[in-house]
Image (cartoon, rainbow, N blue to C red):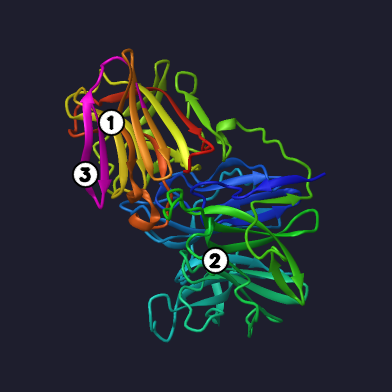
Amino acid sequence: MSVKAVNPILQGFYPDPSAISVGEDYYIVNSSFSYFPGLPIMHSTDLAHWEQIGNVLDRESQLPLENAGHSQGLFAPTIRYNDGIFYVICTNVSHGGNFIVTAEEPEGPWSEPHYIDGAEGIDPSLFFDDDGKCYYIGTHPNPEGCKYDGDWYIYIQEIDIENFKLIGEKHDVWNGAVKGVHWPEGPHLYKIDDYYYIIHAEGGTGPHHAICCARSKTVFGPYENNFNNPIFTHRHLGKRYPIQYVGHGDLFLAANGEWYMVMLAVRPTKGYTTMGRETFLAKVTFEDGWPLVNPGLGVLSDELIVKLDEFVPEVIETSLPNVSKKYDFTRVKELGPEWLSLRKSHKDFVSFTQDGLLLKCGTDNLTETGHPSFVAIRQDSHMFEARATFVPDNLYLGARAGICYMQSNDYQLRFEVYENRARVVLVKGGTEEVLTASPAELSPVTLILKVSGTKASLFIMSDKGVEPLVRNYNIPELSTEVAGGFVGCTVGIFATDGEDREEPVYAVFKSFSYERLLPKPDEEA
């Protein structure tokens, strides 16, 4: 049997992938930065069809993110498995640094974080050797002093994995394949046959991103350069190529005996990236003791055939990536693992009744680095339509609620009901601009956001029909190229209040939907 995997295998904001195989099961974790819960964990048995089985960090005690910017928080996790225990190692750049969490089952519960004293830098990974020893591999600034931004080294040190303590000497083993390289990062360590291999990223996580490899007969080196480096990149293909920023790979052996690599890349639309960095899959073979990624092709393929039996996920459909989603909030009691909030759990402002989802109007603003009353899912298609139906008649003067298309606190598009009016607000560089406003009904209304590439159209639907407020407004500001940072866009619902009232104010949302759209033959996203 075989299946067809379609790239990207995880569409939308799923950056910095790390993957493992455990028997016939495969797991991926991704960075989540300042979103809560942290580090989504995906499961598959065929590498083509994936389900979200949870989030590694789903308790506030595990994930301090106070005042973290959108592209701060959690960087570059690595997942590994050894002797019945799952390990995830990661960096919280905003609070605590490098840490390890463990679990007996990938769904969790995962332990509280074990912060690692002396583990400087970012992008840590773990390697379990044949003799039972465990090694930490990570990155830190050039110990002789950085001569330029990104002048870093990869280092390896033994770690007491039972006590989560670094032991022995720290060894600076590699500083990249290219002379004067910027940001050798995301290193992973493997032992295959007689060699230890370092696979790492170079050139930053943007247009110059690449995957490189070095090897040694001993764990601490010396490591020799692969003359074919970089072993995989799209940086030579130009800005018009449909897939860019390729890098940050993690290698694993499938149950069928074939090697695969997950990596990140982006799919810009007309030069702008709104969905962030996504997870792609490639085949790997070895030649003369060195890995070849997609041999004979040398670039990411749109599809690849995987010789594994087809996997049919059994979780609720909305917990699957790469699908349209519909939520009838009058019929559910909780939000699934795909839902995100900012910096803390949504549980203190989300509740359910027979009337729907009650979203408490928070006092933290979406343009600040606090804990706004906002829940969202990842954008995963260049073209989509999001709808939110809610009842605005219980919003007091000063309170507002609606849909937010979020890139960051400084760049976002809000469609909100405010003082019996519907208005569209674009935030760019932290400055708000009201694009349009219109009277709104107090009866249930549906706010509609339709996105095609970098253009947005917004409509309000009530008993009186559908009224367009904005058509085909260009918003390149919600892209990585303009906003900067490492995240992709999310879309969801929010409720805020300008006053701290004795009695809380709630927006009652009946439903929310996210429909992936396909371009018409004469239409381009």
Which three-letter amino acid code belongs to the residue tagged 2? Leu
Q: Nearer the viewer, mark 1 or mark 2?
A: 2
Question: Disc number at residue 233?
Answer: none
Percent coordinates x, y for residue 343 in the rendering: 37, 47
User: Is residue 172 depicted above or below 5 in this figure?
Assistant: below
Q: Residue at x 48, y 28 (%)?
A: 334
Which three-letter amino acid code belongs to the residue tagged 1? Glu
Q: CA distance from mark 1 to mark 2?
A: 42 Å
Q: Is residue 168 visible?
A: yes
Q: CA distance from mark 3 to mark 1?
A: 13 Å
- The residue singled out by tag 2 in the image is 237
Region of the chain picked out in magenta, as a range: 422-447
Question: Disc number at residue 432?
Answer: 3
Upstream in the sequence, badge 1 or badge 2?
Answer: 2
Percent coordinates x, y for residue 438 in the rendering: 22, 25
Of the pair 186 and 134, the residue shown nearer to us: 186
- In the displayed structure image, the side of residue 49 where residue 441 appears, left or right: left
Picture quarter containing residue 82?
bottom right
Picture quarter containing residue 142?
bottom left
Question: Secondary structure beneath disc 3?
Answer: strand
Number of other residues with Cα within 10 Å of mark 2, as a class: few under 14, some 14 to 19, many 20 or more: few
- In the displayed structure image, the side of residue 141 where residue 40 appears, left or right: right
Q: Residue at x 53, y 55 (%)?
A: 242
- The residue singled out by tag 1 in the image is 416
Q: Residue at x 42, y 32 (%)?
A: 386
Quadrant of the image containing the N terminus: top right
- In the displayed structure image, the side of residue 223 where residue 410 appears, left or right: left
